[in-house]
Image (spheres, rainbow, N blue to C red):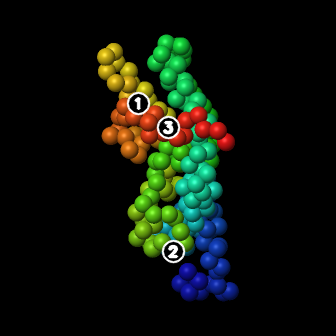
């Protein structure tokens, strides 16, 4: 980029992440992509996004094994609430929570959603970066929503479905979009009633 635009002294590579951040700001607040964004090629944008993906991956997701357990309290409370409803101990039909992107990332990590087949490291190729499931800007953003739908019908298995930003997602090891409640509990058995 320094050569392309004859910038002297040359830009520090770490500046690309900051340029991307300001680019996003101008697009979001002023609907303008003709500022910092204009300097960045598609590959530059991918690399800049990857910087933030790696950061979030290690802070809030699979980059730290502890993150896969941090959503345990939420999952435990959710399972207990649904069980209370199913067993007639509660009439509550909606259990609403408010959270930030950080807590949402932790819950999704605990569920095993958006886990890539290889860890996010600094030596991934551009092609590998393009194939990632865990892309912070696409998975969770400021107005993200996560919810579980529970389906009951007399004489039939209770089903559940995970929805992220109004799109259904398959929880790993479930048989499909609609997962049997009993299987969901089995899959997450090590993350229910955990004791830190």
Q: Which residue is mark 3?
A: 189
Seen at 64% across and 38% down, the residue is 195
Q: Which residue is mark 2?
A: 123
Q: Which residue is mark 1?
A: 182
Q: CA distance from mark 1 to mark 3?
A: 10 Å
For marks 3 and 2, give the one nearer the viewer: 3
Disc on the earlier residue, 2 or 1? 2
Please provide percent x and percent y for residue 133.
44, 56
Left or right: 100 with respect to 172? right
Disc on the earlier residue, 1 or 3? 1
111 relative to 127, above or below = above
Left or right: 70 with respect to 108? right
49 relative to 185, above or below = below
128 relative to 111, above or below = below
- In front of the other: 196 or 79: 196
> Which labelled disc corresponds to residue 146?
none
């Amino acid at each position: 980029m320094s050569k392309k635009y004859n910038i002297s002294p040359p830009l520090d590579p770490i500046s690309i992440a900051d340029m991307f951040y300001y680019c996003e700001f101008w697009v979001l607040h002023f609907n303008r992509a003709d500022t910092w964004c204009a300097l960045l090629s598609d590959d530059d944008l991918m690399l800049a996004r990857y910087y933030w993906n790696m950061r979030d991956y290690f802070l809030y997701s699979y980059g730290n094994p502890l993150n896969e357990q941090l959503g345990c309290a939420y999952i435990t409370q959710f399972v207990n609430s649904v069980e209370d409803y199913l067993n007639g101990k509660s009439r509550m039909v909606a259990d609403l929570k408010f959270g930030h992107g950080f807590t949402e990332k932790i819950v999704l990590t605990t569920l095993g959603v958006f886990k890539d087949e290889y860890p996010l490291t600094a030596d991934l190729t551009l092609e590998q970066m393009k194939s990632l499931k865990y892309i912070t800007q696409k998975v969770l953003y400021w107005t993200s929503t996560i919810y579980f739908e529970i389906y009951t019908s007399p004489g039939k298995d209770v089903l559940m479905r995970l929805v992220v930003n109004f799109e259904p997602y398959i929880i790993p090891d479930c048989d499909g979009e609609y997962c049997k409640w009993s299987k969901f509990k089995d899959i997450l058995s090590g993350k229910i009633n955990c004791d830190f």
